[in-house]
Structures are given as C-alpha cells and as structure tokens.
Image (tube, helix red, strand yellow):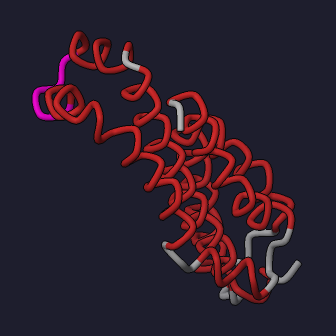
Amino acid sequence: MTEHTLFTLAFTLAAPFWALLILAPGRRLTDRIAASPLPMVPVIGVYLALAVPVFPQLWAAVSRPDLAGFQELLALGGGAGAIWAQLIAWDLFLGQWMYREARALGIHPLVMAPLLVLTILLSPISVLLFLALRGAVRLRVRRTGTPAAAAARP
C-alpha cells in the first residue's frame, strides 16, 4: 500500500467506532466497544506499516526531540503518516475514555456528541472541556447526592 493510502486508511478504520460512540450511545455494542482496546489495533497496524520504514528518523525525532528533527520526519510521507496514525489511535483512546466517564457520570449523550466530534478534530481542546464538565458534574453529584449514572440513559 502507498503512504497516501495508509494515511487515509488510518481514519477510515477508526470512523465506525467514532460513529458508534457519537450516534449510538448506550447500546450494548457501543458500550462493549468503548470498553475494549481492540478498536485501536487496526490503526496501530497502519502506524506500524508507516513507521517501520522510517524508524531511524522516527527514533531520532522522539529520542532527541527538537523542532528540526520533527520537521525532517514530517517531510517524509511515512513519517507524517505515522504521526497521523498515532494521533488517530490516541484520539480514539481518549474518545472511548470520555464516553465511559460520561456514561458513569450520567452526562447526556447530546452533550457528549459535540465533545466527541471535537475530540476527532482537536482532542486537546475537547479533553480540557470534558475535564471541566466532568469536574462540574462530580461537584453537583457531591452537593446534591444524586446518583450520577441514573441520568446516563439516553
């Protein structure tokens, strides 16, 4: 496969899992997928396919990080693709964690859906927003004594 095909494949493999987290919250299948590390495995396979051929440059960039080293890595198609696949896998991991936390705390799926979409696009921002939301919900639960999980059902 070409680097371009693998680059595209990374998100294509993750997209069905994102669709379940966003569009089918609370379903047995969605909850099982959100609890499993397996959805990331195919994306990690794409990462490996892209990273192995550029491993010397990848290792140099991560073991002695500096801007020039990362610029050199990203100039390589396999290097940019590997970093992209790593981001896709990490974002999916974060999305699964956020989904599970939200379900446990009773955060409504309509609140979570935009946060999960934002996680796909800009995960650092969505994680900060989610942490603030999670903190507010935990505080409300402590103050009111309302069981959090009761509200989690869509």
> Is 61 on the left or on the right of 77, as rendered?
left
Q: Answer with the quarter of the image where residue 134 lies.
A: bottom right
Closer to us: 82 or 36:
82
Q: Where is residue 119 in the image (x, y as percent from the top left)?
A: 63, 46
Closer to us: 136 or 83:
83
Q: Does the magenta stretch include residue 65?
A: yes
Seen in the picture, residue 8 relative to 141 is either above or below; the reply is above
Q: Position of residue 76 (x, y in %)?
A: 37, 18
Q: Does the magenta stretch include residue 73?
A: no
Residue drawn where x is 66% and y is 70% of the image: 102
> Is 48 on the left or on the right of 33, as rendered?
left
Residue drawn where x is 54% and y is 50% of the image: 91
Seen in the picture, residue 10 relative to 76 is either above or below; the reply is below
Residue drawn where x is 77% and y is 88% of the image: 28
> Is 20 on the left or on the right of 62, as rendered?
right
Q: Where is residue 118 in the image (x, y as percent from the top left)?
A: 69, 42
Image: magenta residue range: 62-66
Closer to us: 50 or 66:
50
Q: Position of residue 56 (x, y in %)?
A: 16, 31
Looking at the image, the residue that sits furthest to the left is 64
The quarter in which the C terminus is drawn is: bottom right
Q: Main secondary structure of the magenta part?
A: loop
